[in-house]
């Protein structure tokens, strides 16, 4: 099973609204990464947050990490139609083999 | 502009055929990865390579092999394609070090259909 599990599976919002999605994981991690995938394309890296960080910002993106709850959230503020995509979290530990992606949250932003 | 390219966007093959998927990166990255992506399952790692001629199995290596003869090129081989290998295949690369440490750069993907 995936180390990271996103919630919700799908999200539909209107332009200008905020979108929040969550990622929960099972074991201790070194860092957590968020990626975006536009329909039928490769993934694009958004943010990397390390286990000793609690919050990170990049433009309209805000990521939080709560290691006590083993969860992370990705907030997209003032969403645009171009934010329509699937969003994946990926978690990693010390081990080479333990870097795993979740199943993703599909976000649809309507004009 | 950094780039990971994959040889085909769409590929249709027949059961039993040998299939080659090629991936090339121009960032001088040490690490390269092959994933497959299926609905509801996210990305699953097939194989990765941390150096030329070095390879390690990922979570689902059965039915696949890989080759890395040059630093910039990582090939995925389906020895005898089967219908359950119909999927989206994604190649990625990253700088040296464990995969959790650095961001991965992805190619556009190859959608393989095995009939």
Image (spheres, coloured by chain):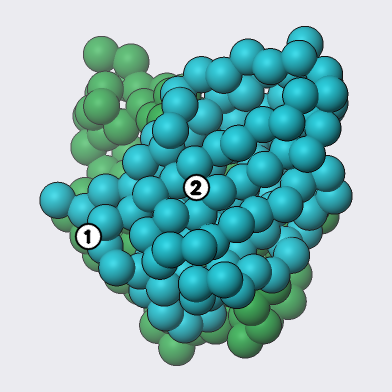
Chain colours: A green, B cyan
Which mark identifies residue B91?
Answer: 2
Hey, which quadrant is residue A108 in on the image?
top left
Whether pointer 1 and pointer 2 mark residues with C-beta atoms closer than 8 Å, the reply is no
Q: Looking at the picture, does residue B35 appear above or below residue B50?
A: above
User: Which residue: 67% across, 31% down?
Assistant: B19
Q: Say which residue label 1 marks.
A: A58
Q: Chain of mark 2?
A: B
On screen, residue B38 versus residue B62, left or right, reads left
Among the 4 quarters of the image, the one containing residue A100:
bottom right
Which of the image's four quarters has the C terminus of chain A? top left
Image-based side of A45 in relation to A105, left or right: left
Residue appearing at x 72%, y 62% in the figure: B58
Q: Are marks 1 and 2 on the same chain?
A: no
| SS assignment at label 1 | strand
Question: In which quarter of the view is residue A90 placed?
Answer: bottom right
Q: Residue at x 67, y 83 (%)?
A: A95
Q: Position of residue B112 (x, y in %)?
A: 62, 23
Q: Position of residue B63 (x, y in %)?
A: 83, 44
**Structural crowding at the residue carrying mark 1, measured as other residues with C-alpha within 10 Å and reported as few (<14), some (14–19) or many (≥20):** few
Q: Position of residue B46 (x, y in %)?
A: 70, 53
């Amino acid at each position: 099973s995936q180390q990271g599990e996103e919630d919700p599976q799908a999200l539909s919002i209107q332009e200008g609204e905020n979108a929040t999605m969550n990622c929960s994981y099972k074991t201790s991690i070194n860092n957590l990464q968020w990626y975006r995938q536009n329909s039928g394309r490769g993934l694009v890296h958004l943010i990397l947050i390390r286990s000793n960080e609690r919050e990170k910002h990049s433009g309209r993106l805000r990521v939080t990490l709560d290691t006590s709850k083993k969860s992370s959230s990705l907030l997209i503020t003032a969403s645009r139609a171009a934010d329509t995509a699937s969003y994946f979290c990926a978690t990693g530990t010390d081990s080479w083999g333990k870097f795993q992606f979740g199943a993703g949250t599909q976000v649809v932003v309507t004009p | 502009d950094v780039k990971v390219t994959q040889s085909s966007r769409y590929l249709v093959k027949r059961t039993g055929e040998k299939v080659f998927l090629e991936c090339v990166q121009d960032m001088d990255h040490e690490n390269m990865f092959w994933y497959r992506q299926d609905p509801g399952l996210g990305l699953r790692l097939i194989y990765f390579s941390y150096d030329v001629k070095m390879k390690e199995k990922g979570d689902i290596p059965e039915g696949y092999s890989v080759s890395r003869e040059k630093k910039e090129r990582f090939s995925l081989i389906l020895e005898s394609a089967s219908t359950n290998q119909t999927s989206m295949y994604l190649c990625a690369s990253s700088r040296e070090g464990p995969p959790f440490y650095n961001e991965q750069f992805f190619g556009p993907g190859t959608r393989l259909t095995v009939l």
